[in-house]
């Protein structure tokens, strides 16, 4: 069920991206500012995208509550694959062969990683020192990366901001898992008497602001691979640090799992870089990157 919920969350994320982007470029008048906001708010497709985003949060919360972060967060990488399929079947975009191969390798190596590394264990009551240490480390790393991304070339800024965003989204996942535990233990009202829900709100807002900045300051072909790769890496570190999750003690299986994870990250980055730069169905085959990318 953990895997199914995680894949459902990834699909909903992909559906949100595709529907809202398709709605935003469908405006015949090319309006801007508040006129664009009003147009989007009256567009059923754009509103459906928000429903998909809500579904993604619910499915991710269910997956994290019932399973390990070290399984759930890497599985969310399949959002790129689902988005690719939606873009081909719905928008009728021409997808390069190398992108399909990258998608296939991403799925295959992800399955190998989960199967052979055998993530298990974890507990719902992390120590206060683990929470404080992990939050300070993740927050500090994100702050340093954001500072690095505040100046320099567009490529450097997009890379640093993308990495900073991914670190915070990994931290958000820990708070989601903690929040679901307080929800089941104390109920919907009692949940608000405990800190995880407030930490989740604050860090999610900061992460969203950083992500929008990353998408704005440089090419998507640079920021998106960092968003995709850094999140599962940091999530695995936090899963061990905060929730004491463990992996197989078999050295050979663990080595195969590590290799599979590295290949998965490389394949996901290739997928992100070689996919069409926009969701315009008229985009010619092979036009997969922005001029600045």
Image (cartoon, grey):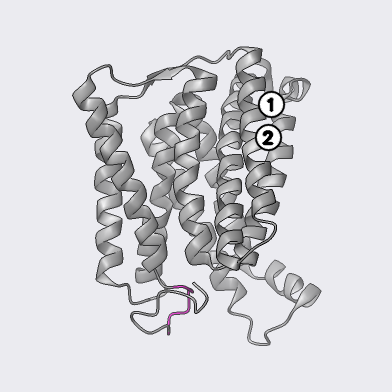
Q: Residue at x 72, y 82 (%)?
A: 31
Name the image quarter holding residue 149.
Answer: bottom right
From this view, report whether residue 96 is shown above or below residue 12.
below
Q: Read off the residue under disc 1.
A: 196
- Does residue 235 belong to the magenta stretch? no
Position of residue 157 measured from the top left corner of the image (x, y, whole percent): 61, 60
Name the image quarter holding residue 43.
Answer: bottom right
Q: Residues within 10 Å of mark 2 (few under 14, many from 20)?
A: many
Position of residue 273 measured from the top left corner of the image (x, y, whole percent): 41, 65
Q: Are marks 1 and 2 in contact (CB under 8 Å)?
A: yes
Q: Is residue 293 left or right of residue 142?
A: left
As rendered, which of 23 and 101 lies closer to the eye? 101
Q: Residue 99 shows which numbered tag?
A: none
Q: Is residue 145 left or right of residue 2?
A: right
Q: Residue at x 64, y 42 (%)?
A: 142
Q: Secondary structure at mark 2?
A: helix
Label 1 and label 2: CA atoms lie apart by 6 Å
Work out whether residue 276 can be spotted.
yes
Position of residue 6 measured from the top left corner of the image (x, y, whole percent): 43, 39
User: Which range is magenta?
Assistant: 277-282
From this view, report whether residue 217 is shown above or below residue 56.
below
Position of residue 211 measured from the top left corner of the image (x, y, whole percent): 63, 54
Find the residue positioned furthest to the bottom.
Answer: 29
Q: Secondary structure at mark 1?
A: helix
> Would you say the magenta stretch is mainly helix, strand or loop?
loop
Q: Residue at x 70, y 70 (%)?
A: 42
Q: Read off the residue under disc 2.
A: 200
């Amino acid at each position: 069920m953990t895997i199914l919920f995680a894949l459902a969350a990834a699909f909903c994320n992909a559906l949100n991206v595709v529907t809202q982007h398709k709605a935003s470029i469908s405006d015949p008048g090319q309006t801007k500012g508040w006129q664009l906001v009003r147009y989007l708010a009256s567009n059923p497709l754009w509103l459906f995208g928000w429903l998909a985003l809500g579904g993604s949060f619910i499915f991710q919360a269910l997956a994290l509550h019932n399973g390990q972060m070290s399984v759930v967060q890497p599985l969310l990488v399949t959002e790129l694959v689902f988005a690719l399929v939606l873009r081909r079947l719905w928008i009728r975009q021409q997808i390069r062969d190398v992108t399909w191969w990258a998608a296939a390798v991403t799925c295959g190596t992800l399955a190998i990683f989960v199967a052979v590394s055998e993530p298990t264990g974890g507990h719902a009551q992390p120590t206060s020192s683990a929470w404080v240490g992990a939050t300070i480390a993740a927050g500090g790393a994100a702050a340093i990366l954001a500072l690095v991304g505040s100046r320099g070339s567009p490529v450097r800024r997009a890379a640093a901001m993308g990495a900073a965003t991914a670190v915070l989204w990994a931290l958000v996942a820990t708070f989601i898992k903690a929040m679901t535990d307080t929800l089941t233990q104390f109920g919907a009202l009692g949940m608000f008497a405990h800190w995880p829900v407030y930490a989740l709100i604050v860090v999610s807002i900061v992460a969203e602001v950083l992500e929008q900045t990353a998408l704005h300051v440089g090419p998507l072909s640079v920021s998106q691979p960092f968003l995709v790769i850094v999140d599962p890496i940091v999530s695995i570190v936090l899963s061990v640090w905060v929730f004491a999750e463990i992996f197989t003690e078999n050295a050979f299986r663990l080595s195969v799992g590590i290799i599979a994870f590295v290949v998965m990250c490389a394949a996901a980055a290739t997928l992100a870089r070689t996919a069409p730069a926009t969701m315009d169905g008229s985009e010619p085959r092979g036009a997969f990157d922005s001029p600045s990318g």
